[in-house]
Image (cartoon, grey):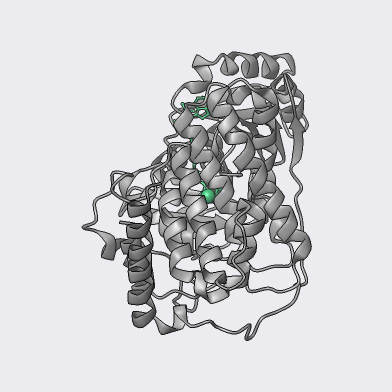
Amino acid sequence: MSRVWEFNYWAKELCIYWHLSMANPVAYGRIPYKGVVILDNFTFQSPTKIIFGKDTEHQVGNEVRAHGSKVLLHYGGGSIKKTGLYDRVVQSLRGAGVKFIELAGVQPNPRLSLVHEGIELCRKENVDLILAVGGGSTIDSAKAIALGVPYDGNVWDFFEGKADADKALPVGVVLTLPAAGSEASDSCVITNEEGWLKRGYGNQLNRPVFAIMNPELTYTLPPYQTACGAADIMAHIMERYFTNTRDVDFTDLLSEATLKTIIKHVPIVLEDPENYESRAQIMWAGTIAHNDLLSTGRVGDWASHQIEHELSGIYDVAHGAGLAVVFPAWMKYVYHHDIPRFTQFAVRVWNVEQDFFNPGKTALDGILHLESFFRSIGLPVRLDELGVPSDRLEEMANKTKTGNDGKVGNFVKLTHADVLKILELAK
Ligand code: NZQ
Ligand code: ZN
């Protein structure tokens, strides 16, 4: 980095900070740990049976058989046919005497219309289990179908908060893309084409009954999808890491180790896509990042996810790429809320040398390291690099889902005006 460039960069950062701190004294005031809890009571339930390693997809028939005799085989745009995985899954199902019907065509940012189609099909065919073979979009589409089959109303009710599910069909998974963590998570994210609203729904029923995870299945991922997956995995960890809960050393350290695993192994697989060891590290880290182990006893933030969902909902960009743009902008906006936590992130995760007399600089350095890492693995870090124009930022800010208090996030409670400023920082 040239000195002139570096000077300009820091001058710009300082201007942004000055401007925002004047406009947002609440977000930028160093808010004391008021109303903060120490390690919360928690219930941790992660019932998904994980079957991990080479050739494990051959076990899918027997796993399905334990839950019924007829299955909906659900998948995306055809990558599983190109790689030969489809044939191996079908052979295993047949070998176990499982009958199946198929529904293909899940698109990234899975659509509600296909979910409705799946619900009708499963009811007509009396299906016992939905088998998702693919990435997060296929798994989420399967989860939504599973919720909708036994429900009399419109499955979208769950995503709008109008109803809560009390039963669902079981979902099984053969994972081909480490990213969303949906293979063991309690959440499901669907896009309603009417209004292009992307909404998540959390319920313990959403956790798959099994997930088959063979790292070799990820060798065929295009580099951009590998990188998007890395950003999503890191975002799931960081959403939990930036918390107001105190005394969370154990989960802080677990989170830092999980982040460092991704930082170490993603560049290796981008160079060497068939490196089993690194693919395996990434795949397992991706599940741990989002099965809620890392949020035990602490309150996560999730503002960056809520903001990003409007990006991928409206512009149909990859979720991980949207996060690579939004997360650093969110960090730059809120880091003064808790400089020690951001300093810890910089020093422990990015090996930034601590500036004892200027901890704010150390904190900001950590954020810049994250941004450089995203760039180094081929991700966009600004809206224009993502191909998103800046003319609908206000609409995105207004659409961003809030909590019951009308605010977005927990670490710093953001108003729509704050969200708009974060999106402007991402330009
Ligand atoms: O459709 P196919 O042909 O399978 O191709 C997919 C798709 O084009 C391709 N792909 C997957 N595995 C592959 C492969 N190509 C070659 N080789 C392989 N092994 O990758 C493309 C992207 O797939 P997708 O499933 O959309 O990606 P991802 O796993 O990142 O899932 C993204 C979705 O998950 C949601 C996101 O919002 C987004 O809709 N999320 C779900 C969460 C959850 N349920 O817990 C949490 C996350 O925060 C996230 O919001
Ligand atoms: Zn995510």
Observer-nearest residue: 245 or 201?
245
Q: Position of residue 114 (x, y in %)?
A: 42, 38
**In the picture provided, is 422 more to the left or to the right than 269?**
left
Up the image or down, 214 lies above or below 246; here it is: above
Up the image or down, 325 lies above or below 169; here it is: below
Q: Residue at x 58, y 46 (%)?
A: 233
Q: Residue at x 63, y 49 (%)?
A: 206
Q: Residue furthest left?
A: 391
Observer-nearest residue: 121 or 311?
311
Up the image or down, 291 lies above or below 100; here it is: below
Q: Position of residue 122 (x, y in %)?
A: 55, 35
Q: Position of residue 131 (x, y in %)?
A: 62, 32
Observer-nearest residue: 322 or 182?
322
**In the picture provided, is 48 more to the left or to the right than 218?**
right
Observer-nearest residue: 64 or 306?
306
Q: Quadrant of the C terminus?
A: bottom left
Q: Position of residue 259 (x, y in %)?
A: 64, 48
**In the picture provided, is 19 more to the left or to the right than 405?**
left
Q: Residue at x 69, y 31 (%)?
A: 280
In the rendered image, which quarter is residue 362 located in?
bottom right
Q: How many marks?
A: 0
**In the picture provided, is 9 more to the left or to the right than 267?**
left
Query: Can residue 144 be seen here?
Result: no
Query: Can residue 146 be seen here?
Result: yes
Q: Residue at x 68, y 50 (%)?
A: 291
In the rendered image, which quarter is residue 130 located in?
top right
Q: Residue furthest front?
A: 3
